[in-house]
Image (cartoon, grey):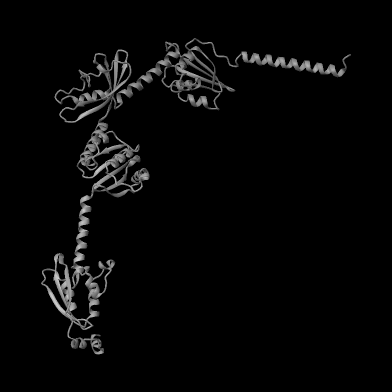
Amino acid sequence: MPMDWFDFIFVAITAIFGAGIVVLIAQKIESHSKPSKQLVTAPDNDIAFLFKSGIMMDATPGAMAMITPHLGKMSEYDATLELLGSRFPGFQEALTGDDVTSLRIDDEGGKGLWVNITKEAERTRITVHGNRQQITGGTVGIIERDIRLTELMMLRDLTQHTPQLIWQEDLSGKLLWANHAYLSFCDKLRDDETADQTTWPNKPLIADLHENNIGKAPSARRVSVPLPKQKAEQWFDVTSVRREDSLLHFANDANAIVRADQERRNFVQTLAKTFAQLSIGLAIFDKRRQLAMFNPALLDMTNLPIQFLSARPTVDAVLDRLRESRMLPEPKNYTSWRDQFTALEQAAKDGRYTEVWNLPDGQTYRVTGRPHPDGAFAFLFEDISAEVSLTRRFRSDIETSQAVLDTLADAIAVFSSAGTLIMSNRAYSDLWGPVSDERVQQYEVQSAIRTWQNRCTPTKMWGELRKFIHLVGPRKPWSDQALLDDGRQIKCEANPIAGGMTMVKFTISAPTHPVIHKLTQHDPALMTAKR
């Protein structure tokens, strides 16, 4: 079928477009095969770099020789900035700035070196040049030498001004080298008469360090050096490193650490002595619920074997042994005694546990739980058997005394020197009215006298009785009589007793003759005279 005009035009356009693509690809390949700014042909020891967007595209052998030792720590671009930036002032600013297209920077050391920076699009070309008539060894050698010299000077300055003592010995212990701190300390150790700042130390500061450092691994030890004319010692933490046929020693001042350790040990010993002398049993459990510390009083009070306590048992094991030896109060519900122990432990951690243990053998312990830092807690066992026995006996004596007073027919009341009612018997309550236990400590003699006056005919004896109760110093027994409102005669006696207290006794006279009794009954005239 013959080709029409439309197909012919389409084929021609396609051929032309394909030829253009081939030409563009060829130009692209040619442009890539030849750099836009080819590196200059230079000797191997010259330095020239070509970077594109911070990535090195090419470099001379001399340039690679300069940055290769640093490539393990940084990129080619960063290594170039680090090495050349330290020698040529403004190099980093010029390289990273956008306003620089071509720049020459001279060496600040004045040794005939300069660097050229040329920027074109995204490419940056760096070349280092030197005056070969004044410089031998090549540009790379000069820069490397200066860098090494700078690093060497810095290391020497560090070793001479560091407060750490640094020295070197051979394998036989002979001193080979020492820094300034080492020599200054050796000068302090010399006597004043033989002191010579320029004399090299004849022997190492710390002997026998070489004998324990045969292996290649670093070793550390703490040693002391006696100071002349002083009882104190200088302590060092010495680290030794094997270097081929020599040993390098580093000594750090350890006086503060040693003093802190000594103070801590002294404090612990003081606490141990104090705990040993306490009459209160002490058991401290750490955060893992194991016994961390106990004192001898705990052994005496619980009768637990020292081998058992020294094995650092848990709190459950200790409570189990206490229950087995009948040193715990027996619970009513045996199935829940474990839960009680758990509650006891938690209460001790919160500082809320305080109980009195009444043991089967008659002893009484006050057990207190106290929290400690880091989750630890302590139990304090205090034997209060004597205190409880004394309290019980005292309470028994009071009850016996009260029972004796209640058997007496006379009304008796005891007042303190301040006029407060201390105690009274049953006959007093029957005569003057009951006094509740809550009112005893607040019932004063004024209130009592007011009650007595309301039940008796007017008389001056109550004022004299009040003065007698408040009187300070030696007193003689006092007595007087009064007439009750029902006509009975009452005798009041006040006797001083121990502690400035006063015992007041009321005695009612025997019944009178019926005629006299009739005469003493209530009548309006008597009540009017009373008012």
Look at the picture and state if 313 lies above or below 226.
Answer: below
Look at the picture and state if 420 lies above or below 288.
Answer: below
**Picture quarter with the C terminus:** bottom left
Q: Position of residue 178 (x, y in %)?
A: 27, 20
Nearer to me, 214 or 350: 350
Nearer to me, 82 or 327: 327
**Picture quarter with the N terminus:** top right
Q: Position of residue 316 (x, y in %)?
A: 33, 39
Q: Give the quadrant of residue 143.
A: top left
- Res. 415 in view: no
Q: Is residue 465 left or right of residue 25?
A: left
Instruction: Determine the residue located farthest toward the bottom in the rendered image.
Output: 525
Instruction: Determine the residue located farthest toward the top in the rendered image.
Output: 43
Nearer to me, 15 or 216: 216
Q: Position of residue 235 (x, y in %)?
A: 24, 28
Q: Give the quadrant of residue 296.
A: top left
Q: Which residue lies at the image location 31% right of the left edge and 26% below the top edge? A: 162
- Res. 370 in view: yes
Q: Position of residue 406 (x, y in %)?
A: 21, 68
Q: Which residue lies at the image location 35% right of the left edge and 38% below the top edge? A: 287
Look at the picture and state if 296 lies above or below 124.
Answer: below
Q: How many marks?
A: 0
Instruction: Determine the residue located farthest toward the right in the rendered image.
Output: 1
Nearer to me, 400 or 170: 400
Q: Which residue lies at the image location 87% right of the left edge and 18% below the top edge? A: 5
